[in-house]
Structure formats: C-alpha cells, structure tokens
Image: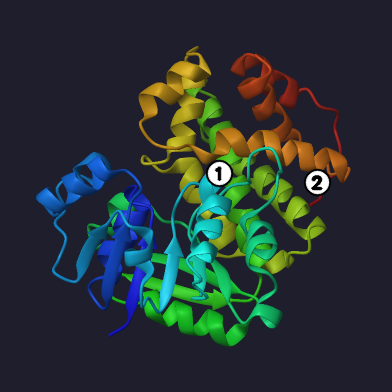
C-alpha cells in the first residue's frame, strides 16, 4: 500500500483522494484551517462534495509538511493560479517526491501551462531526478465519487514513471491510461474549458444541436492547432485528454465553464456569474492567456478570441456569436 498526498480539497481533489483511498493511504491537504476542521468533523467535504463519507485510509491536513511526509506521490489539485506557489512551498520543504497535477488551465499573467511552470520550479526531471506529469481527461467529480465509470490519461516525459504513477491511481471505476505527451495533455485540459464557455453561450442562445456540434468540432481544431504549435502530438487530441474532455465539458450538466456560457447568454454580468458559481471556472482566465499566447505565435483561434471578447472586453454574447458566424468562407482544416 502506497501513500499519496492530494493537495487541494475542492470537488475534484476530494473525489480523487476518496477514490485513491480505496487502495492506498491518502493525506488530503487544504490551506484553509476552517475547511480542514469541517472535513475532520464531518468525515466528508460538505462544502464541495456533499455528504460522501471518507474511509479510514483518508486523513485531512492543514500542515503541508505533514501531508507530504513519506508520500510516494504528490497529486496537486490546487487551482492553476496557485500551482507555482505550491511547488515553491514543496521545494522549501526539501521534498523531491514525484508530482502529478490534475488541474487545468494557464497561469494568469504568464500564459504558461502547468508543465512549463513545473519545468521552471522543479527543473528537468532528467537532471533533477524529480519526476512530474499531468492527469487529465473527461472527469466530473460528482460521477467519480459515486463509483461511475471514468477514464483519464496520465502523461509524463518518462514512460516508466508515467506507467508507475498511472498504476497507483488506476483501479475500481477509474481507468488511467498513460502516455508521454505532457504538452498535449496539458493543452487539451486547459483550452477545452474555453470551448465549453462557447458551447454554453451557443446553448443559452438556443442555437441547437447543430451549432453545438460545430462549436465542439471547430473547437477541437483550435485546440489541436495551438497544441501542435507548442510541441504536442496531434493524436493526443483524438484521445481522452483531447476530444473526450472537450465533449464532456461542452455537454455535461456538471460543467462549470459551460454554466458560465449559459448565464452570459442570459444577459448576466460575468462578475455576478462567478459570484454565484461557488467554484473555480478555469476557462475564464484561460481564454485571456491563450489569446495572448496565440497572438504572439500568430495562431488563428477565432472561437477563443470571441469568448475572450465576451469575458474581458464587454462584448455581448450574441454579438460574439454573430461575428463568429459572419467570418468569411474558407476550406475546413486543422
């Protein structure tokens, strides 16, 4: 039995911790002392995941050092905006344990993907010996915690580590595939959230199934174009971390990013939408950062552009969709 430290007690972090605790010892860490106290008393995470009960293999910590002590693997599920900080805190504790992240997005202000942050903070695993990787795919916490079938992908530059880490998390109702395309898995997990906002806007406008299917398909083309330009493998975007995650997030009832789009389409202000959401919607920050990076690399991303216009430049959802549909005719291509 291994020990896994899960950092971040939101819905997805808690669901992963509960799943893994069926096979291993798990330390679930949260920064907020009140949140930790509440989970210890309830033996559940009522704030983010209802009354699903923790088993005896899962313990909750507010002390990061205690949480990662003797861990065989650290699984980071903090928001992407806090990823660099948590890596720095881990480094200060002199830990060289392998790290896998399960959050999706680009770092605010730098437009860097999690693997680029990891490279800066932890160094090249081939030199440092500290392995790291990304876990992503079509996965709603509410379904994993109910024991419903779920499949995701774990990517790491080192094939042996990718297989080892995947085996630690794989089991029961969660199937974990492994590959070595960290860039592709990171891009797919990040940019699909932007497309989910677009799909939500389309659905909220009542544009129907045809429009949603077109949005998903052309969204996948944008994600692939962006990822390949950054060094990803095209085939990754045909898998769980690409098409799979995109389809789920654009259609699923638990999708926070799709909900943002739905509410924007109803005329609500973004600030009010986010206040009422209660959870992080990574696509809001990601849209801005993806466009910043795409512009610097001359990558055409029209859906992402219009979503960002609606989110940060005051453009109405209807006007954004109208402008997207009014683009000149062209040949279909990735």
From this view, report whether residue 98 is shown above or below residue 163. above
The quarter in which the N terminus is drawn is bottom left
Seen from this angle, which residue lies furthest left? Answer: 41
Residue pictured at 58% horizontal, 65% vertical: 239
Residue pictured at 60% horizontal, 35% vertical: 285
Q: In which quarter of the view is residue 22 placed? A: bottom left
Q: Looking at the image, which is closer to me, 8 or 32? A: 32
Residue pictured at 65% horizontal, 36% vertical: 287
Instruction: Tell me how the rendering is colored.
Output: rainbow
Where residue 67 appears, x then y in whole percent? 33, 65
- The mark found on residue 332 in the picture is 2
Report how far apart the C-alphas of labels 1 and 2 lie in the structure.
35 Å
Decide: few, some or many residues near mark 1? Use Cα within 10 Å; few <14, some 14-19, many ≥20.
Answer: some
Give the mark nearest the N terminus, 1 or 2.
Answer: 1
Closest to the camera, between mark 1 and mark 2, is 1
Disc 1: which residue: 81
Let me know if residue 133 appears in the view. Answer: yes
Q: In which quarter of the view is residue 120 placed? A: bottom right
Where residue 171 appears, x then y in whole percent? 32, 77
Q: Looking at the image, which is closer to me, 75 or 84? A: 84
Residue pictured at 71% horizontal, 43% vertical: 110
């Amino acid at each position: 039995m291994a020990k896994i430290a899960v950092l971040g007690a939101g819905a997805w972090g808690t669901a992963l911790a509960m799943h893994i605790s069926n096979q291993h010892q798990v330390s679930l860490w949260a920064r907020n002392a009140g949140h930790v106290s509440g989970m210890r008393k309830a033996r559940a995470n009522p704030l983010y995941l209802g009354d699903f009960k923790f088993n005896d293999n899962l313990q909750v910590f507010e002390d990061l050092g205690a949480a990662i002590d003797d861990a065989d693997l650290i699984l980071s599920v903090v928001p992407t905006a806090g990823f660099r900080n948590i890596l720095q805190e881990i480094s200060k504790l002199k830990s060289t344990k392998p790290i896998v992240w399960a959050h999706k997005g680009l770092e605010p202000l730098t437009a860097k993907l999690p693997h680029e942050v990891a490279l800066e903070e932890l160094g090249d695993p081939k030199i440092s010996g500290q392995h790291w990787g990304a876990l992503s795919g079509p996965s709603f916490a509410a379904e994993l915690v109910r024991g419903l079938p779920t499949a995701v992908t774990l990517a790491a530059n080192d094939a042996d580590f990718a297989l080892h880490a995947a085996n630690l998390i794989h089991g029961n109702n969660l199937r974990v595939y492994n590959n070595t395309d960290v860039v592709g898995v990171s891009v797919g997990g990040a940019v699909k959230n932007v497309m989910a906002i677009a799909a939500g806007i389309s659905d909220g406008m009542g544009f129907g199934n045809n429009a949603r299917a077109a949005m998903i398909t052309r969204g996948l083309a944008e994600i692939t174009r962006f990822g390949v330009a950054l060094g990803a493998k095209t085939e990754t975007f045909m898998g769980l971390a690409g098409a799979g995650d995109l389809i789920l997030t654009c259609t699923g009832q638990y999708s926070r990013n799709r909900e943002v789009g739905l509410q924007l389409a109803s005329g609500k202000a973004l600030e009010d939408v986010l206040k009422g959401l209660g959870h992080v919607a990574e696509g809001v920050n990601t849209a801005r950062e993806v466009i910043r990076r795409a512009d610097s690399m001359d990558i055409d991303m029209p859906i992402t552009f219009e979503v960002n216009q609606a989110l940060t430049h005051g453009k109405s959802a209807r006007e954004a969709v109208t402008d997207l549909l009014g683009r000149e005719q062209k040949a279909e291509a990735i």
